[in-house]
Image (spheres, rainbow, N blue to C red):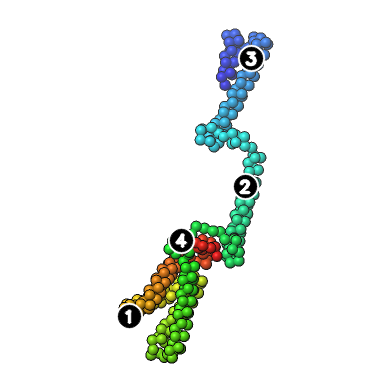
């Protein structure tokens, strides 16, 4: 060591040149020499400890995470083995709580899905109303389902009255029920129209596109036949032509309502669930 070399040089200078016996060195000089050696060894030991501590701090700074500014966060500097152990114990508990909450949310969602159809079927006050997506008859009157029901019901009663009136006239004139006369052919046609009207009403109540389509096709047939008949008798029977014109106008409006209904049910806009939630509409009442 550096301190030992200096002491050796000093000790050599204390011994007179050419002297073989060590007794020439004074006792106080020997004592002083020993104290210097002890102090030098202590200084060397303190320097070794300081170097070791510096190396350990450099290693910790290289391993410890930084917060983006090159410095170690205070939370990391202050973390102790006990706090790390507590965090490790709390992490499984937090994961278990999160899984429990997710299961509860899933169960509540399934329960709402199961109870929604019952609410729609049994409790009108439980409906969640949404903005209407379907079309209204002439843009302001009523929804397409209500229009189909009203128009076909009206057509049914008009046809029933017409058939009753025609039957009374035929009985008064002595016309029998024969397939060769005009009265019988008209009566059968009107009877078919009554059946189709009833079927269309049921189709609208059941939200059936195919049943309403049958009524739509039959209305088209009636419109064509009545137009051809009016064109034949427009000069000889004015009353008949007026009646045919009124019925043709009613058929056109009915075709309009049935076409809207079929389009909305085909696209899924109008269903049993959506009708009560958003599609139900009337300009004059809430029924």
Q: CA distance from mark 4 to mark 2?
A: 61 Å
Name the element at disc 4: loop
Question: In the figure, residue 186 lies in which quadrant?
Answer: bottom left
Q: If you read the primary sequence from the N terminus, does the residue marked by circle 4 or circle 3 appear first? A: 3
Name the element at disc 3: helix
Q: If you read the primary sequence from the N terminus, does the residue marked by circle 1 or circle 3 appear first? A: 3
Name the element at disc 2: helix
**Dot 2, how many residues are within 10 Å of its Cα: few (below 14), some (14-19), or many (20+)?**
few
Image location (x, y in percent) of residue 192: 44, 81
Name the element at disc 1: loop
Task: Locate residue 250 relative to residue 54 in the image: left or right.
Answer: left
Mark whose residue sits in front, 1 or 4: 1
Whether the residues at callouts 2 and 1 have beta carbons within 8 Å, the answer is no
- The image's mark for residue 91 is 2
Q: CA distance from mark 1 to mark 3?
A: 156 Å
- The image's mark for residue 33 is 3
Which of 148/115 is in front? 148
Against 255, residue 94 (above or below) is above
Mark whose residue sits in front, 3 or 2: 2
Which image quadrant: the N terminus? top right
Question: In the figure, residue 20 lies in which quadrant?
Answer: top right
- The image's mark for residue 236 is 1
Mark whose residue sits in front, 2 or 1: 1
Q: CA distance from mark 4 to mark 3?
A: 119 Å
């Amino acid at each position: 060591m550096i301190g030992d070399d200096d002491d050796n040089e000093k000790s050599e200078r204390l011994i007179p040149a050419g002297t073989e016996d060590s007794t020439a060195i004074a006792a106080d000089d020997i004592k002083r020499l020993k104290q210097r050696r002890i102090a030098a060894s202590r200084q060397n030991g303190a320097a070794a400890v300081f170097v070791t501590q510096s190396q350990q701090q450099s290693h910790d700074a290289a391993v410890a995470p930084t917060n983006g500014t090159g410095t170690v966060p205070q939370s990391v500097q202050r973390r102790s083995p006990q706090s790390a152990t507590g965090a490790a114990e709390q992490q499984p508990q937090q994961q278990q709580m999160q899984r429990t909450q997710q299961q509860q949310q899933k169960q509540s969602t399934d329960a709402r899905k199961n109870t929604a159809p019952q609410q729609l079927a049994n409790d009108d006050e439980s409906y969640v109303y949404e903005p209407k997506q379907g079309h209204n008859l002439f843009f302001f009157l009523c929804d397409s389902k209500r229009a189909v029901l009203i128009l076909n019901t009206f057509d049914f009663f008009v046809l029933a009255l017409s058939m009753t009136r025609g039957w009374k006239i035929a009985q008064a004139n002595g016309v029998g029920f024969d397939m060769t006369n005009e009265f019988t052919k008209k009566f059968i046609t009107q009877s078919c129209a009554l059946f189709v009207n009833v079927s269309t009403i049921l189709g609208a109540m059941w939200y059936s596109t195919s049943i309403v389509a049958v009524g739509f096709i039959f209305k088209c047939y009636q419109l064509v036949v009545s137009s051809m008949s009016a064109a034949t008798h427009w000069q000889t029977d004015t009353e008949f032509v007026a009646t045919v014109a009124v019925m043709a106008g009613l058929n056109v409006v009915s075709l309009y309502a049935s076409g809207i209904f079929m389009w909305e049910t085909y696209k899924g806009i109008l269903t049993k669930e959506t009708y009560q939630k958003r599609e139900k509409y009337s300009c004059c009442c809430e029924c």
